[in-house]
Amino acid sequence: MAQVAISNVAKAFGTVKVLHEVSVDIADGQFVVLVGPSGCGKSTLLRMVAGLETVSGGTIAIGDRIVNNLPPAKRDIAMVFQNYALYPHKTVEQNMAFALKLRKTDPAVVAERVKRAADILDLNPYLKRYPRQLSGGQRQRVAMGRAIVRNPQVFLFDEPLSNLDAKLRVQMRTEIKELHQRLKTTTIYVTHDQIEAMTMADKIVVMRDGRIEQVGAPLELFDRPANLFVAGFIGSPSMNLLKGVRKGDSVEIAGTAFPIPAGNAAQNGQAVVYGVRPEHLEIHADGVPAKISVVEPTGSETLVFVRFGDGGEMVALFRERHDFKPGDTLNLKPRLDQVHLFDAETGNRL
Ligand SMILES: Nc1ncnc2c1ncn2[C@@H]1O[C@H](COP(=O)(O)OP(=O)(O)O)[C@@H](O)[C@H]1O
Ligand SMILES: [Mg+2]
């Protein structure tokens, strides 16, 4: 196993810069997730760690070696792709053994490693099957088995669950997390799905347009997003982000006063964005009067869309059942310890 150090790494395709001086430190054994919208540069960064793309600036180190000019095969990494990239004419067993055979590994060692991977991934019943005879989830497991048998210093995953249906995705996410707890191999995992990032990562790197927006443990990002982008990206349903102006000891939003925590950094008269998650709005007599427009029950929770003041809109989430109907009026009060304030100009947390 090994730590990975990505230092001021930049990437340009021709004249187009797609990564700007990105730095990420990944500790030995850590599970780090790179998350961000499509096109933000996640795959490019991962492929640079793998050696599948050249580095335009900065350094990448695996263990204590700078690997910028090392070919992929010498980097001691194993990558799992979204499309699995299995060999269609090889069985599950042959797919898993192939990379080791290429390296002329002792056949006894190959057999033992394949057996161990098959045990870990519950693939024993399928060893003689071909990829086309497997379900999507089983193929995904074979792709992981192929990575495991190589016993690499670092696992690299690029959206490995995107081709699976929603239920299987949740199941495989737990399996990958369990696998990591067991093998403790340093892992870099790329996804556009913030729930996957939140549930799997030791550390999340939120990216946008080739830059890092914030790095932190999942709940750190959830509890203290550094800027509006992270506030809106992390958490489902999304945080309400309401434009307003600080006036005395409240923020005025759509002509309505919202309470703010004491000691916050907003200046009187400053344009701010007031952030409050749907689950942090409570029904309270001195809350903001709000009229229900839409009620969405999911069974375990209910989303309530409301309008308030002069054109304001927000969403509240309740875990307990209420008999709400469109047109009803509620008084909603943000939990003061869960209010986030951002500078409306810079988007940064105040
Ligand atoms: N080989 C390439 N040539 C030119 N542009 C590329 C190439 N690969 C990726 N890009 C561009 O780099 C940006 C980042 O792409 P990518 O790393 O695939 O994003 P992500 O994985 O976050 O969706 C995108 O704008 C994409 O169009
Ligand atoms: Mg990608």
Image (cartoon, grey):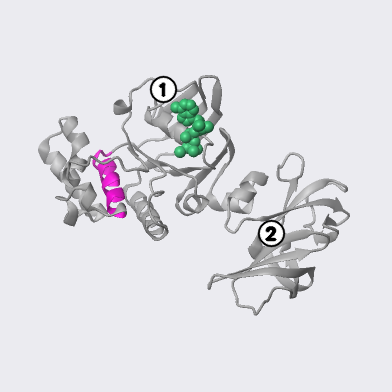
Q: In this view, does 227 lie above or below 256?
A: above
Point 26% across, 53% down: residue: 121
Q: Mark 1 points at which residue?
A: 68
Percent coordinates x, y for residue 271 in the rendering: 82, 46
Q: Mark 2 points at which residue?
A: 338
Q: Quadrant of the N terminus?
A: top left
Q: Quadrant of residue 306?
A: bottom right
Q: In which quarter of the image is residue 282?
A: bottom right
* Secondary structure type for disc 1: loop
Q: Looking at the magenta stretch, what is its main secondary structure?
A: helix
| The residue carrying mark 2 has its beta carbon less than 8 Å from ligand 1 | no
Point 17% across, 57% down: residue: 125
| The residue carrying mark 1 has its beta carbon less than 8 Å from ligand 1 | no
Q: Do the residues labelled 2 and 1 touch (CB within 8 Å)?
A: no
* Secondary structure type for disc 2: helix
Q: What's the residue type where badge 2 is placed?
A: Gln
Percent coordinates x, y for residue 295 in the rendering: 64, 70
Percent coordinates x, y for residue 258 in the rendering: 80, 60
Q: Is residue 193 magenta?
A: no
Q: In this view, does 300 lie above or below 311?
A: below
Please state if 57 lies on the left or on the right of 322 as rendered: left
Please state if 293 lies on the left or on the right of 37 as rendered: right
For marks 2 and 1, the one nearer the N-term is 1
Please state if 160 lies on the left or on the right of 218 as rendered: left
Point 84% across, 56% down: residue: 252
- Residue 266 seen by the camera: no
Q: What's the residue type where badge 1 is placed?
A: Asn
Q: Give the range drawn in magenta.
A: 137-151
Camera-side residue of 24 and 140: 140
Q: Is residue 333 above or below residue 13?
A: below
Point 36% across, 51% down: residue: 176
Label 2 to label 1, Cα distance in Å? 44 Å
